[in-house]
Image (cartoon, helix red, strand yellow):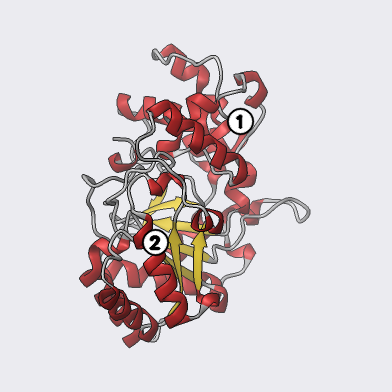
Amino acid sequence: MLQLNDNAYNKMTAPDEPKLKLWTSMGLLLTYQCPAECEFCYYNCNPQKSGLLSIENAVNAWQQLKNIAGEHAKIHLTGGEPFLQWPHLQQLLSKAKAMSMGPVDVIETNAYWAEEQKDIIERLRFLDDHNVSRLKISYDPFHAEFVDFSRIKLLYTTACDLLGHDRVMLRWQKYFEQSPQIKGLSEEQKLDVFLQSHKQYPFRFTGKAAGKLAKKAADKQTDQIAEENCKKAFLGSKSVHIDPFGNIFNGVCSGIVIGNINENPLDVLWQKFNPAKEEFLDVLFKKGPAGFLKKATKLGYKKYRLYAGKCHLCTDLRRFFFDKGLFGPIIGPKECYI
């Protein structure tokens, strides 16, 4: 297990200043492909996307997180929709079990596949036998547009019976008790329902959420968010995500690549990571996304009158820079932007 002073940024800071936290949680995005195309998706997933995280990269990153965090390391498997790659998922869990990697804290699914109870039972038994601690089922107005509630109900009730209620998470329980009616609504009506959900269960306006949703929710002028930097987000996040191509995202900042496990092991990257030493990250770190407005405007960026917040502004600027071919490979991969 590493110590805080093993990190390059932490070595430079005074004892009473905030330090970069140890990364203790890691999400492995097996694929960007998903049968749904939710309006709030951080990673802009949809049925046309692809990519597949190799078994080797997944296991190596897993071990590297354990090198950083020791017994505090937690792994969750996500996507996209990881169950689209069921044989690959089986191979990964079998490899991890054979290597005594320890438990998977959570595996996420939207239950699109949960049509036949016998198939559900077979898969749940496999997960249970391969050290998966909890199953997380995503259900809200966004997923309700794409996945029939009958599949959510069948998976949830079967999993609770087989694994026990304490090992089944439902995001969110409210919508299980009263399924949202989305199909048949106009686009404007859907957005209204989505934003009502956001008020109760807030999410960041990044990824696809920085599109139609953010524009409808926008209520802040740039001068209201101009002083909001990303120092706290960079230093305070204890989690990373690894995408199918080995790209590393800090926390839930999708589309900002801070490294790649094909180039540097995760534990080595944590030790080297200094957001104040890289031009693009340094601007976010010290000034926040508003620090890019002058440069972007000179290049032709058309500023909105209002934004939904710092993450909305950041994502919109990064889309502009991506289209211009600037700040690669930090602004990437294309799956997060196209």
Mark sitting earlier along the chain (1/2): 2
Q: Compared with residue 232, is residue 166 higher up or lower down, i.e. above or below?
A: below
The reply to whether dot 1 and dot 2 touch (C-beta < 8 Å) is: no
Residue that numbered label 1 is attached to? 287
3 sits left or right of 211 in the view: right
Q: Quadrant of the N terminus?
A: bottom right
Where disc 2 sits, the SS reads: helix
Asked which quadrant contains residue 181, the reply is: top left
As shown in the figure, which amino acid type bears the numbered disc 1?
Answer: Lys
Query: Is residue 212 among what the camera can see?
Result: yes
Q: Identify the residue shown where x is 25% and y is 75%.
A: 119
Q: Compared with residue 192, is residue 293 higher up or lower down, i.e. above or below?
A: above
Give how far across and how far down residue 25 sits, in percent: 51, 65
Q: Quadrant of the C terminus?
A: top left
Residue that numbered label 2 is attached to? 152
Give how far across and how far down residue 128 sits, in percent: 39, 83
Which residue, as the protein is rendered here, is positioned at the far right?
A: 16
Q: Identify the residue shown where x is 35% and y is 40%.
A: 183
Q: Identify the residue shown where x is 44% and y is 41%.
A: 40
Query: Is residue 78 among what the camera can see?
Result: no
State the CA–CA distance, disc 1 to disc 2: 43 Å
Where disc 1 sits, the SS reads: helix
Asked which quadrant contains residue 141, the reply is: top left
